[in-house]
Amino acid sequence: MQRNLAQKISLVIAVLCYLAAAGFTIAALVYEPRQSGDPIHASFMASVIFFIGCGIVLHVIARTRLKGLVSLSAEEEHRD
């Protein structure tokens, strides 16, 4: 499967999002909340959910077969 430049970039950013989610997971596990409902601990956990969601969306975009859906040149349309 041939990917265009935008799909390659989105795959790299997806991997970075997964790494950020792993980092925030470690931070949430290491950080000891001072009280029940500590906002810092809650923001670490919210960041994990956010980065996992971004990574999944970008990973799907990077893996999608776009030929036929999006055409960047008129020449490709005439070949099919």
Image (cartoon, helix red, strand yellow):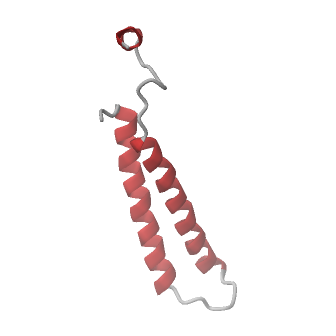
In this rendering, is residue 24 above or below 2? below
The residue depicted at 52 percent of the width and 54 percent of the height is: 54
Q: Quadrant of residue 68?
A: top left
The residue depicted at 59 percent of the width and 88 percent of the height is: 33
- Most foreground residue, 49 or 28: 49
- Most foreground residue, 8 or 79: 79
Q: Quadrant of residue 20?
A: bottom left
Give the percent coordinates (x, y) of residue 26.
43, 78
Image quadrant for the N terminus?
top left
Give the percent coordinates (x, y) of residue 80.
38, 14
Q: Residue furthest right?
A: 37
Describe residue 30's horizontal placement relative to residue 12 as left or right: right
The residue depicted at 42 percent of the width and 52 percent of the height is: 14
Counting labels gives 0
In this rendering, is residue 11 above or below 67? below
The residue depicted at 55 percent of the width and 73 percent of the height is: 44
Q: Quadrant of residue 22?
A: bottom left
Q: Residue furthest front?
A: 80
Describe residue 77's horizontal placement relative to residue 35 as left or right: left
Give the percent coordinates (x, y) of residue 18.
42, 61
Give the percent coordinates (x, y) of residue 64.
43, 39
